Amino acid sequence: MNGISDIVTSVQHTAHYVNAHLADHAGSGAGENPSGEDQINADVWADQLFFDKLSALDGVGAYASEEREEVVDCGEGYTVAIDPLDGSSNLASNNSVGTIVGVYDAELPASGRELVAAMMVLYGPYTTMAVAREDSDVVREFLLREGFSEQWGRFTVPEQPTVVGLAGKKNERSDAFNEFAAELERELKLRYGGATVADLAQVLEYGGLFGYPTTTRYPEGKLRVHFESAPLAYLVEAGGGSSTDGEQSLLDVEPDELHARTPTFLGNRELVERVEAALGR
Ligand SMILES: O=P(O)(O)OC[C@H]1O[C@](O)(COP(=O)(O)O)[C@@H](O)[C@@H]1O
Ligand SMILES: [Mg+2]
Ligand SMILES: [Mg+2]
C-alpha cells in the first residue's frame, strides 16, 4: 500500500478504538494545549493513541498535533497534522466529537495547497469517516462498525442550502458579520453544536454554511489552519463545496506558525461568496 493508504488505514483503526473507549475518558481537565485552551484528559489520551499508530508508519516523516507545541520528527515521509479530538468540550455534555487529519507533502508551517489527503471522523450516534485524497476524484465515506469499516458512499455538498451554524457571541462579532448572520438565519435552519466536525457534517448532509468568524476574543478566528481549517477545506472543496477565510480559499492561507488560527467558513459556494461579500463591505 502507498503512504496515504497506510495513513488512512491507521486513522480508521485508531478511530475504532477511540470510538469504543470515549466513555472511559469524559473526565476533567489535564492542563492547557499550546493554543492556551483547557486540555481535557481525552484530548491527551486520543493524541497519544494517534501518535503511537501514525508515527510508526514508514510513510510518516513528522507528526504535528493541536495538542503538542512542536512537530515530532519521525524520519522520512509525509507530515501528518491532527486534531485528535475536535469539540472535546462536548464530551461533558455527551454530544458529538470528531478527529481531523491533514496529510501534508511538506514541512509545516505550510498552506493547504501542500495537502495530499484529509480525513474527518465523526463520533456521533454511529461513527463515520470521510476521506479525500489526491489520487482519487471522489470523497469516500466509511461507516465504522465493530471491527471493520464499510464504504458507505461518496459525499458531495447538496446544491440547495438548508442549515447554517455561525459561531461566536454576537457582542464579540462585527456589526457587518452580525447583519450577515441575521440575514442567513432568517433563510436557513440554525444548526450549531460546538464541534466543528459535527456542525460541518450537518452542512455536508443538508447543504448550507458553517463558520467561525473573527471575534474580539479570537481576533484571528478560533480554528487552527493546519489542524482544522485547511484539512476540512480540502475535504469540502473535493466534495464540490467551497471555503474561505473571508477573502480567499482556506487552502491558500499561508500560516506563519504551527498553531496559527484563521477565520473559517465552509459550505455551499453561493453562501461562501455571500460571506466574502458581507465581510468585504
Ligand atoms: O465553544 P465555541 O467558542 O463555540 O467553539 C466551538 C469550536 O471550538 C472547537 O471545539 C475547537 O476545537 P477543539 O475542541 O479541538 O479545541 C471546535 O470543534 C468548535 O467548532
Ligand atoms: Mg478542534
Ligand atoms: Mg481538539
Image (tube, rainbow, N blue to C red):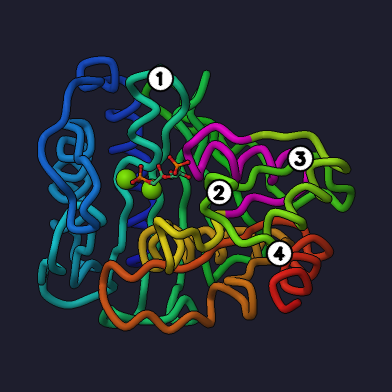
Q: Give the range drawn in magenta.
A: 192-211
Amino acid type, label 2: Asn
**First in residue order: circle 2 vs circle 3:** 3
Residue 201 position (above or below residue 94): below
Q: Residues within 10 Å of mark 4 (few under 14, many from 20)?
A: few
Q: Position of residue 275 (x, y in %)?
A: 73, 65
Q: How far apart are marks 2 and 1 (CA)?
A: 45 Å
Tag shown at residue 25: none
Q: What element carries label 1?
A: loop
Looking at the rendering, in which quadrant would you find the N terminus?
Answer: bottom left
Q: Where is residue 229 in the image (x, y as percent from the top left)?
A: 48, 62
Q: What element carries label 4?
A: helix
Residue 125 position (above or below residue 172): above
Amino acid type, label 3: Val
* Residue mark closest to the camera, 4 vs 3: 4
Q: Is mark 3 on a helix, strand or loop?
A: strand
